[in-house]
Image: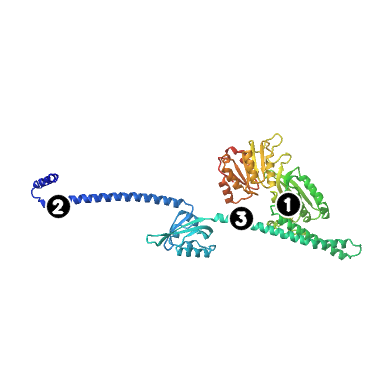
Amino acid sequence: MAQMQTARPTEGIRRSLPMGISESMSDDAQRLLDELHVRQDAFEQQAQLVRQLQTALQRAQATNQELALVADRVTDAILICDAHRCISWVNPAFTRLTGFSLTECHGQLPEELLSGPHTDAAIVAQINQSLAQGASIERLEVCHHRKDGEPFWVRRSVQPVHGPDGQINRYIEVLTDISEPRRADAEHARRLEAEVALAAKVEFLSRMSHSMRSPLNAILGFTQLLDMGAPGGLSESQQRHLQHIHTAGQQLLTLMDQALEFAQLDDKAVGIRPQRVELAVLLKEIRAALEDQAAQHHITVVVDCPSLTVWADANHTRAILMNLALNAIQYSPQGSTVWLTGKAAADERLGAIEVRDQGFGIDPGDLPRLFQPFTRLDSSSRSANTGHGLGLAVSQRLAELMHGRIDVTSTLGHGSVFALRLPLAEMPGSGRTPGAQGRGQEPAVLLPPLRVVHIEDNALNRSLVEAVFAAYPHVRLFSAENAAEGMAAIESQRPDVALVDINLPDGSGLDLCRRLRAQTEFRKLPLIALSADALPDHIARALQTGFNHYLVKPLQIPRLLGILASLPSAQAAPPTT
């Protein structure tokens, strides 16, 4: 009944078709209508597929943008090479690392582009062989050359990429710059090599000195016995020859002693015992000790020194000044004067002891060679006198070990001035350390009440900092000789600031800084690095580690005091060197 009911309307439609339209034409229209519906459904499906493709394309574009952003910002250099290993794309980091732009390196082989005189051909052959066998390269270290020819070290990783057919259709390569670690390793190796060479040199000179003293003892001993023999036993010429032998033996003994001393000056174990040295007293002692030598050359030695105190090793200071004064006497004409003058250079916080002579002077071209070992300058009529060219080299090195120096000025025909400069312990007439106030006067730099921890293994450096803070009774200073003691002092005393040497006997000041910054209570503790290392990359590393300031030795005391005076704002200030 239902079928009959549905068929009747169709028959009714056919009976009511307009004139001119046949039943066959009506059937075609229905068929076309049905086909239209089918195609409409297909179009809708295609439209839905297009929308899906558009969504996927948008996602792919977003992913590509993210990948491009990563490639632009990543610090490693990235290359994409085709199946023949010719470069097709590089990221900006590659250009920064090598100097080559994408246009310049497109289509070139990486090895041909980057290889140079320092590139190991065996490593390049290893790379090519591994990639030819379909293997990858993992973190292989190799030296390459930038566009300007400068060598640099990288760690290379190369991964082949396979296509749908299983064949390699491209390579992705990553270059990690390791030049800085390689330089640090090389510097460490050079230092170790230098220390080993120094130890070997000192050992050799020590053994040589010990072995040569026995025959020298015989030579000098028997010459003394001959000289002590019965009067008239030797002729005048024989006595003169005997004296020459004795003099030459003494010169050889002095040379051995000076050579051994000079070699040991680069040893960290050389003894420096800092103390307050009163220069006026010391200069008078030196004048008395050289009285005989001055009389032999008819030289007058004049001492002119106010009350002046320096921080130094008394024995080493005496040895330096004795050497400088003896040279002045030997190279001065008879009847002239040698002045030993002391004065303060307040701007540098140094005491200067000048040894002035009236000798022939030194040619300006010879001044750069003056402190080189075994250098003797023939600048006077007495140039043939004793000496081996080690005295000034030893004196300059000793002065440096005491944070001082020796300066020279000279004018041909008018004499020379050798000035030993050492850190002041007290300003003239004040009885206080550098920076201390005079009676009723305030220090040049005012410091707030502070608790300061100073970590330094060198005794002279600790004494210098103690002298700086002696002018500030409200500043409490806690000194430590190594990293362990320094860490314990910081944890127990809770200081307002810490002064830290970088090279410590039981570790690095950088490691100490990292340990402190890892603890919440010391995260904002002002840390000031004091180091003799002036390399810019080392300074930058210290500041990046967490030091607030980095001061290079010799210490600029006014700068240190200025930093300490502004401590409340130092934590927010940018790091400085």
Question: How far apart are labels 3 and 2 at the CA level?
Answer: 95 Å
490 vs 256, left or right, is left
- Quadrant (top left, top right, bottom left, bottom right) of the N terminus: top left
544 vs 169, left or right, is right
Is 78 rendered above or below residue 3? below
Counting from the top left corner in percent of width and height, residue 15 is at: 8, 47
Residue 77 in sight: yes
Question: Mark 2 or mark 3, which is nearer the start of the sequence?
Answer: 2
Amino acid of disc 2: Asp
Is 306 rendered above or below residue 266? above
Other-residue count near label 2 (Cα within 10 Å), few / some / many at <14 / 14–19 / ≥20: few
Amino acid of disc 3: His
Nearest to the eye among marks 1 and 3: give it. Answer: 3
Give the structural element (helix, strand or loop) at label 2: helix
Residue bearing the label numbered 1: 417
333 vs 115, left or right, is right
Q: Nearer the viewer, residue 57 or 355?
A: 57
Residue sitting at x 64%, y 35% = 449
